[in-house]
Image: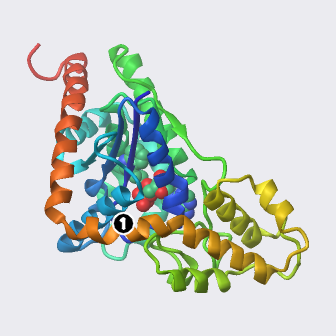
Amino acid sequence: MRIFSGIQPTGRKHLGNYIGAIRQYVEGQERGDPALFCIVDLHAITVAYDPEDLRQRLYDTTAILLAAGLDPARCVLFRQSDVHEHTELSWLLGGVCAHGDLNRMHQFKEKSAAQRELVSAGLFFYPVLQAADVLAYRAEEVPVGEDQRQHIELMREIARRFNERFGETLIVPEHRIPEVGAKVMDLQEPDRKMSTTVGSDSGRVYVLDEEKAIRKKFGSAVTDSGRDIKRGEGKQGIANLIGILSAARGVSEESVEAEFEGAGYGDFKKAVADGVVEYLRPVREAYPAIRSDEQGLEAVLAAGAERARELASVTLADVRSAMGVGPA
Ligand code: AMP
Ligand code: TRP
């Protein structure tokens, strides 16, 4: 099974990224043949950013993935901009992607509304580059959080349209969205997803947060005026905490509800904090040594890019040939 996913090198990675995506990557490298994970720096330049900061955040994200358990011997970990096939393919796929489909993308609407200076054409074209990321490897499975569902639907449509017009060339990929934790909500505003760019720091738990900070954030998490530790109407805050604890412990949400039946919200929040502190501890502890070795990180990325290029170049040759681009 060929598995592919991408993650942005922007901001600091949070518990939503970890539960929704990163833990699935780690599990995916067991099944992947191969599993490819790409740090998508070219997606990050579609909104305002600082060039030096981008490079630093790219190392941060690479180090988090390694600390979380990605093993370069068992997966292909690389930087998007190192493999030129992605950008070339995105342009070629632009020929079979409907403008109207891009116009419907929720993420474009949200992100463009947040831009102060410029809504870039790159931001509009972003989903086509994302399609190229996956289709270049003929990946079958794409582990992501719920917020990427629409982008995966679009890349499926692009692959289908390509195959219809130019003959069977690309694989139509499937998303893999976890049952629990696909949409971790903000701790302060539980009707909104936890996000790097929206909301305050107290609403999001970072993967690298110290124990004290994690406890404080869960301690002040917004709940409701009731007393039941159960999912249901008007209980987004509690439901979110149930989901988080269930992911952290690797048990079902039902068993969390059963265990905390009759308990108070204070005790429950403390248990969630304990669970998350332990869950993230191995990553937090492994991170500093990995992050401080930038040469080591570059070596991992370079080796990954080389393997990625080998696979992507085969697809690109097929796509160019099917489209009549370049010599026969
Ligand atoms: P990004 O950092 O935007 O590149 O996102 C990386 C991955 O994390 C993607 O697969 C997203 O779907 C996932 N993700 C982002 N935010 C959340 C969230 N609040 N809950 C679950 N998954 C998320
Ligand atoms: N757009 C995705 C996000 O914001 C990141 C991404 C880029 C991606 N390329 C991808 C995810 C390919 C899955 C497959 O999270």
Q: Is residue 232 visible?
A: no
Give the farthest residue toward the left. Answer: 327
Q: Is residue 239 left or right of residue 19?
A: right
Q: Secondary structure at mark 1?
A: helix
Q: Name above or below for residue 149 compared with residue 316.
A: below
Name the residue carrying label 1.
286
Residue 172 lies in quadrant: top left
Q: Name above or below for residue 242 compared with residue 80.
A: below
Residue 225 lies in quadrant: bottom right
Q: Is residue 195 left or right of residue 70?
A: right
Residue 166 % position (x, y):
32, 16
Residue 161 % position (x, y):
42, 25
Q: On the rendered image, what quadrant is the N terminus found in?
A: top left
At 24% from the left and 31% from the top, the residue drawn is: 312
Nearest the viewer among 35 and 109 is 35
Type of the residue with mark 1:
Ala
Q: Is residue 197 left or right of residue 88?
A: right
Nearest the viewer among 155 and 23 is 23
Nearest the viewer among 22 and 47 is 22
Q: On the rendered image, what quadrant is the C terminus found in?
A: top left
At 61% from the left and 63% from the top, the residue drawn is: 184
Nearest the viewer among 257 and 170 is 257
Q: Is residue 8 left or right of residue 249?
A: left
Circle 1 packing at 10 Å, graded few (<14), some (14-19), many (20+), is: some
Q: Is residue 139 visible?
A: yes
At 17% from the left and 58% from the top, the residue drawn is: 296
Q: Name above or below for residue 286 compared with residue 227.
A: above
Q: Name above or below for residue 39 compared with residue 191.
A: above
At 88% from the left and 72% from the top, the residue drawn is: 228
